Image (cartoon, helix red, strand yellow):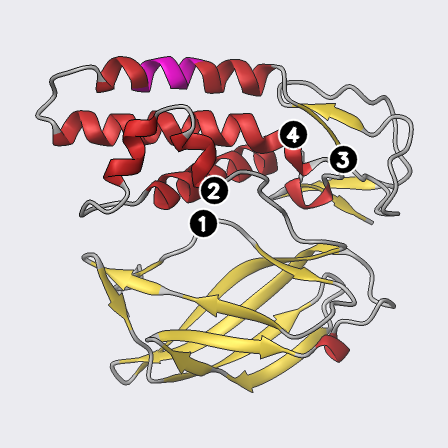
Amino acid sequence: MSASLPFSVSKRLPDLLERDPPGAQSLSLPLATNGATVAPTSGTLTIRKGDGSDLITDQAVTITDEIATYSIGASVLPSSLSLSRDWIAQWSLVVDSVTYRIEWPVALVRRVAVLAASVSDMTTRHTELSAWKADDGPSLQDFLDEAWAELQERLWRERRYPDQSLTPNSFRLPAVYLALSLAFLDYHASAGGTGKYKELSDHYRAEYDQAWAVLQFVQDIDNDGTPDAGETVAGDSVLFLGGGANWRRGSWGFRWT
């Protein structure tokens, strides 16, 4: 076997599973190469908790739209489980008669992250964007999804976990400004590098940087579902001086112990 896989995993963020959920939740592992989906023929999934024990072991996955998928019933994630960012999904997938093992980070959280923004937040600022929504190529929702993914990655790096936010509306402006910057940069390239779009892209990139610099939200550090004193954090620096949990640093930041 070569030193690297002959395909890539087409996702960026850790998977989030909600503890004591109202219904089943799904995990998936999309694979791709050269811009095309790589479809496994079969596979299994093991989810290993932070203490080394298994939540599920070697469970058969289903292949849905060429992507390995597994549905986790609500009863498998009861409220008695400890919240954690230390879980690992261990996928064993068969592609072209070869078995590949891939690990992906999983977090058990109180609630999943929420984006409080929509395409209308973009089109109300620039009505001309409405005429572009039906064009070939990325949609405005694609740019908004990309902006939200980039924002979440940045928050994870800063240990400001968006799933812990009790004020998800705080992320609206940074996400919208970044989406507009990405959209106008793409349109600049499509227009042959001429016109106003690069200027607009740069303008909204600056707006995004400013929105990030003043970003503040309530991070539910102790995971009790209520805002407490000392739980307000910022994009560039932590404003709280303490918290109700014990922390240790790991590959994705500080983790519950």
Q: Are marks 2 and 1 in contact (CB under 8 Å)?
A: yes
From this view, report whether residue 98 is shown above or below residue 248: below
From this view, report whether residue 59 is shown above or below residue 201: below
First in sequence, mark 2 or 1: give its number.
1
User: Disc 4 designates what residue?
Assistant: 170
User: Disc 2 designates what residue?
Assistant: 149
Q: CA distance from mark 4 to mark 2?
A: 15 Å
Viewer-proximal residue, 248 or 168?
168
Element class at badge 4: helix
User: Image check: 144 left or right of 183?
Assistant: right
Q: Amino acid at mark 4?
A: Ser
User: Image check: 32 left or right of 23?
Assistant: left
User: Disc 3 designates what residue?
Assistant: 219
Q: CA distance from mark 1 to mark 4?
A: 22 Å
Element class at badge 1: loop
Task: Single out the mark in the foreground, 1 or 3.
Answer: 3
